[in-house]
Image: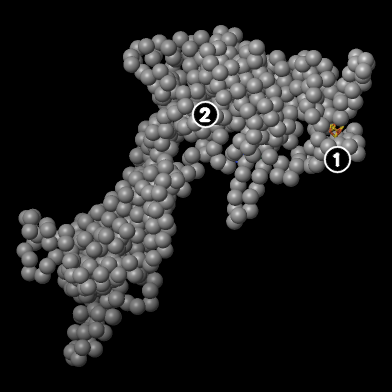
Amino acid sequence: MFKKFFIPRMIQYFTVLFIGITLVFVIPRLLPSDPVSTQLHRMTSQGQYLDPAAVEEMRETLQELYGLKGGMLQQYFSYWKRLFTGDLGPSFTQFPTPVIALIRMSLPWTLGLLLASLSLSWMIGTVLGGIKVSFPNSPFSKATELLAMGIRPIPYYIMALVLLILFAFLFPVFPMAGGYSVGSKVGFNARFIKDLLRHSFLPILSMVVLEIGGWFLQMRNVASNLVEEDYVVYAEASGLPKSKIVFSYIMRNAIVPQITGFGLNLGFVFGGALITEMVFSYPGMGTLLYSAIIAGDYNLIMGINIFSIVGVSTAMLIIDLLYPLLDPRVRYQ
Amino acid sequence: MSILRVENLKAHYVTRKHRKVTRVLAVDGVSFQINKNEIYGIAGESGCGKSTLLKAVSGLIKPPLEVVEGQVQYQFDDRDLDLLTLRGEQERREIRGVRISHIPQGSMSVLNPVRRIRKSFEDIIGAHLGIKDKREFEDMVRKHIEALGLDWNVMHSFPHQLSGGMRQRITIALATILRPDVIFADEPTTALDVVVQRGVVQLIKTIKKEQQNTLVIVTHDLAIHANLCDRLAIMYAGKIVEEADAEALFADPKHPYTEMLLDSLPIVGDRTTRESAPGAPPSLVHPPSGCRFHPRCPQAMERCKLEAPNLIEVEIGHRVACFLQEGIVDENVQEFDAR
Ligand SMILES: Nc1ncnc2c1ncn2[C@@H]1O[C@H](COP(=O)(O)OP(=O)(O)OP(=O)(O)O)[C@@H](O)[C@H]1O
Ligand code: SF4
Ligand SMILES: [Mg+2]
């Protein structure tokens, strides 16, 4: 029974990973530009004189380094071999720093930022949505609904810029940019953590404020449909107390799609928050990806993509595996 | 002895959109009495207001449903109760499930999908009696369940793990665990196959016999009514058009609509295909003038378009709303009346 549930899902997971990672390999190779020529061009255009023999030699070295040597198939196999040893190749622009080192540097920043804002907005939105459905006509619910509807359509960058101008420029309570103060020592101590929180406050706030609305509305919509369900009507008809109906009948069922949504978003954390990180000059994956795209740093782009693919599909696998615990209608079989 | 008296009840669905008010006259002037310990059936085609009537008389009134007029009076053994004057959630809660039990339509899905059956029993008993002792609770439920011929093991299942018939039985068991005085069952056998239907009907009879309660059952399946009910009301477009002892009604239907309904029933051994009642059900937003049945009535007269007939007693215990019958009564009355 368990096997029947578990194995197909694992097969599906690895198939998705395989296809995704293969696409990451194939797509850059379909592009007309060739990173080796680009790199050589960059060097020669900087005014260096190189004689053709040296250029040719350099071309070979670069091809070797970038993993571009040999036929497609050969490249593909060595690509997988390198992946399994955790080697994503060197970054072209920050040669010879390995891509994995760059990612390792940026990832914690992004994780901290996104995990915090995702969890906060999810919790607040879900609770507010639940309150709305339980007491639909209370002034508090009406006010939150109005706010949620009003704030949601605001484009993200405007929200971020407004917060930045308000709280970093006009009333400089929070720093303008960066992940921590220049010159402060990175370490696990109260002072640094305080500095870290101060720097992450505005970026997190900007995302939380906008995302609460989405979670709130989803919770409200799902739950207000549930109110019409036969089993809720029946619970009312058999005189169960309101609190019981709200928690065990409405919220308990509405939380299932809510948790699924949370899980899916967890997967996207690895891709970074491009706009947030740019507006607040935050040193995360978004910033890294942006600079990689601008500079045409293929290895780096590929590396970040691989992280995203693994992140999203692993999150989906975990939801899938946990789903029967949330909804008994889906069983382990 | 009546246990429920409904007088001129009007229950409408009122929706407002851009200041335009739409009013569905789902129950529009209904009066009847239900006697203690009887099984009272309500029949009529889809959309005629059967479910709405049950909701209104069992106090499940929330927007868009509004009771605009009328009275719903219960006479329980120990107290009288005016349902529509109950104020506040608390007062209504005390009645529900204990005095009045309502099994809603679509009872295939009345059990919470994420709760085990046992939990549903805990919920209802906990809400009304409180559960002080786990043993006591289990004994109570076990006794009830086993008296109904159900296996205790179903208590540990989730609703989706049970067959439709089993779910329906559990729902009925749940609705009767607190021995309510009146049970309203809305289409309890629809969506079940015939063999299972028979089992469910048998179960209802068993409970009724054991608990001595009053049962009001809605279904458009006249065969179930014939099998189960003492008295029967036929609804058409938000009104009761005929009411009588079940036997009398099947033997001698007096309203043209009832005749039409009975004509549409298949008869065993008869191979000619039966027509279903011709014509479409009327709109309840703008119901036909006069007698609401007149556009479909083969015997409609000029008068029927202008005036609405009242539901009057034409024989003892047999009430009909049709001008054809009024004439007969008038003659009878004239014969008796020597004025
Ligand atoms: N929530 C609602 N809002 C507006 N109109 C409604 C609502 N529920 C029911 N109605 C309308 O009220 C009328 C009576 O509905 P009701 O459910 O009482 O019919 P019914 O006799 O039980 O039909 P069925 O046999 O299909 O269950 C129908 O015309 C229906 O469209
Ligand atoms: S009152 Fe007229 S229209 Fe209505 S059922 Fe009787 S004969 Fe037909
Ligand atoms: Mg109905």
Instruction: Give B166 or A157, whichever is nearer the viewer.
Output: A157
Residue B78 rendering spot, x and y as whole percentages? 52, 13
Which numbered disc covers residue B86? 2
Q: What residue lies at 81% left-to-right and 35% top-to-bottom?
A: B308
Callout 1: residue from which chain?
B
Looking at the rendered image, the quarter that the C terminus of chain A falls into is top left
Colour scheme in the image? one colour
Q: Is mark 1 within 8 Å of ligand 2?
A: no
Q: What residue lies at 20% left-to-right and 79% top-to-bottom?
A: A58
Q: Which sits earlier in the primary sequence, circle 1 or circle 2?
A: 2
What is the C-alpha distance between the residues marked 1 and 2? 39 Å
From this view, report whether residue B214 is shown above or below residue A48.
above
Which numbered disc covers residue B166? none
From this view, report whether residue A63 is shown above or below residue A114.
below
Please tell me how crowded label 1 is: few (under 14), some (14-19), or many (20+) other residues with Cα within 10 Å.
some
Looking at the rendered image, the quarter that the N terminus of chain A falls into is top left
Disc 1 target residue: B305
- Secondary structure, mark 1, is helix
Residue A325 rendering spot, x and y as whole percentages? 36, 35
The answer to whether residue B112 is left or right of residue A270 is right
Quadrant in the rendering for residue B261: top right
- Secondary structure, mark 2, is loop
Instruction: Give B79 or B280, whichever is nearer the viewer.
Output: B79
Please tell me how crowded label 2 is: few (under 14), some (14-19), or many (20+) other residues with Cα within 10 Å.
few
Residue A78 rendering spot, x and y as whole percentages? 27, 61
Instruction: Give A319 or A46, whichever is nearer the viewer.
Output: A319
Quadrant in the rendering for residue B102: top right
The answer to whether residue B303 is left or right of residue A254 is right
The nearer-to-camera label among 1 and 2 is 2
Q: What residue lies at 24% left-to-right and 58% top-to-bottom?
A: A113
Q: Are marks 1 and 2 on the same chain?
A: yes
Q: Is residue B184 visible?
A: yes
